[in-house]
């Protein structure tokens, strides 16, 4: 049971890290603000959720799910809101020009 | 495995700090500063100092970053100019000397090694089981009292300089659901940190900083209108912490004959009362540092 959980945990964490890597690659390589945001916000939330799930599996205790879940919810929430705010600010700057 | 993590972390701190210093864009520089602060907080966790890590993440990275951003908003964009090589060499030399002196002081001072044994010997008398809280609010409560006074002096200075209030701008429809979840959670988390500070890492400073973060969401989102009356109330709450702490110090002097020596067996309730008031007061002070003081027209003074 422990080994199964560990394998599942490591797999999920690896997937999560690769999501974050793709997000970083997107921020680095994509040409403009909106497409960078698109790459960042989605891959970021998904990557963190996968890592948190993996970490909970590695920890092997159900109560760690609560704390990690709270982290994921807060990061996803602020990610969505900040992405929205940045896009808004970018668009209104475009209007001014 | 953890060694690799620590080495990466150390390089990350240096790299983000260099990135923060190397860019000419103020906002990017502040972003670098905040990320450096978060990585420093993570290294403090690795060093086994979760109390300091919490304070660094909440105050050092979070609220200081917000204060810097607020100041950057008032300043003009930075001129991009390269300082002469001789200046940079002098600055580098001063930085190396300072780091060397700090490293020498840390490695030669015996205090760090002596302290834990002394604290754990008398921990049972302190009324709390978290050694950090025991030191901050009991053994060296005097220092904490002075720290609050220093914070208050900073607030008075801001009052004298009288910066412009930040103008709330319309932040869009996502701000309301965000505030609805985050603000109650901040209040809840602040209470949790305050209460658990007696036994595990947490305490008034961290709780106050998180509460202040929640209040800033309300202000910047435009949900709380900063009337002069509200700001005056904030000032009162900010003063309350120092006042209550000072009164507590004087009453312990009267009750036990020693400044900030709590009466036998009642240490926990004294500490909890002081910390609860300090939490509110620190939150008010940090908020007022961010949004400025109430302004009166000249003829009103």
Image (cartoon, coloured by chain):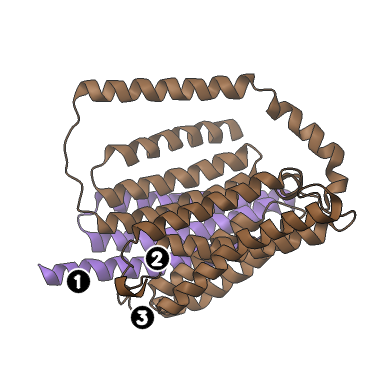
* Identity of the residue drawn at 74% across and 55% down: B250
Q: What residue is shown at x 65% (from left), y 55% (from top)?
A: A57
Q: Residue furthest left?
A: A97
Rendered position, A84 above or below B7: below
Work out which quarter of the rendered image holds the C terminus of chain B and state it. bottom left
Q: CA distance from mark 3 to mark 2?
A: 23 Å
- Chain under label 2? B
Write down the chain letter for disc 3: B
Q: Quadrant of residue B178?
A: bottom left
Q: Which colour denotes chain B?
A: brown
Q: Which residue is mark 1?
A: A92
Residue at (41, 61) in percent of width and height: B290
The tag on residue B291 is 2
- Residue B266 lies, in percent from the top left, at 86, 58
N-terminal label among 3 and 2: 3
Taking depth in this image into account, of B37 and A82 the one nearest to the observer is B37
Chain letter of disc 1 in the image: A
- Please name which of the two marks, 3 or 2, marks the residue nearer to the observer: 2
Q: Secondary structure at mark 2?
A: helix
Residue for point 58% across, 31% down? B3
Q: Which chain is purple?
A: A
Q: Disc 3 versus disc 1: distance between alpha carbons? A: 15 Å
């Amino acid at each position: 049971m422990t080994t199964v959980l560990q394998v599942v945990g490591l797999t999920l964490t690896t997937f999560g890290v690769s999501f974050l890597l793709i997000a970083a690659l997107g921020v680095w390589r994509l040409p403009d603000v909106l497409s960078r945001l698109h790459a960042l916000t989605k891959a970021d939330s998904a990557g963190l959720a996968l890592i948190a799930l993996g970490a909970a599996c590695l920890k092997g205790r159900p109560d760690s799910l609560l704390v990690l879940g709270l982290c994921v919810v807060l990061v996803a929430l602020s990610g969505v809101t900040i992405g929205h705010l940045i896009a808004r600010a970018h668009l209104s700057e475009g209007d001014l020009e | 495995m953890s060694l690799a993590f620590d080495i990466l972390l150390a390089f990350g701190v240096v790299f983000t700090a260099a990135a923060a210093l190397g860019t000419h864009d103020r906002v990017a520089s502040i972003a670098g500063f905040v990320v450096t602060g978060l990585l420093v907080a993570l290294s403090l966790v690795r060093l086994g100092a979760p109390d300091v890590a919490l304070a660094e993440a909440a105050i050092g990275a979070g609220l200081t970053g917000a204060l810097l951003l607020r100041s950057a908003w008032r300043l003009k964009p930075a001129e991009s100019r390269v300082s002469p090589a001789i200046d940079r060499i002098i600055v580098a030399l001063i930085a190396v000397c300072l780091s060397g002196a700090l490293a020498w002081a840390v490695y030669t001072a015996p205090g760090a090694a002596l302290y834990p044994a002394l604290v754990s010997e008398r921990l049972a008398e302190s009324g709390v089981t978290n050694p950090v809280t025991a030191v901050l609010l009991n053994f060296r409560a005097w220092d904490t009292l002075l720290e609050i006074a220093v914070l208050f002096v900073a607030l008075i200075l801001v009052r004298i300089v009288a910066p412009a209030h930040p103008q709330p701008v319309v932040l869009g429809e996502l701000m309301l659901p965000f505030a609805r979840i985050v603000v109650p959670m901040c209040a809840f988390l602040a209470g949790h940190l305050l209460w658990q500070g007696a036994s595990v890492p947490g305490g008034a400073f961290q709780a106050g900083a998180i509460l202040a973060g929640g209040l800033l969401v309300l202000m910047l989102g435009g949900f709380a209108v900063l009337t002069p009356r509200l700001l005056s109330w904030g000032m009162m709450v900010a003063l309350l912490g120092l006042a209550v702490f000072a009164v507590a110090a004087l009453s312990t002097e009267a009750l036990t004959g020693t400044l900030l020596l709590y009466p036998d067996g009642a240490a926990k309730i004294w500490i909890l009362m002081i910390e609860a008031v300090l939490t509110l007061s620190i939150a008010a002070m940090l908020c007022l540092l961010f949004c400025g003081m109430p302004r009166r027209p000249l003829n009103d003074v």
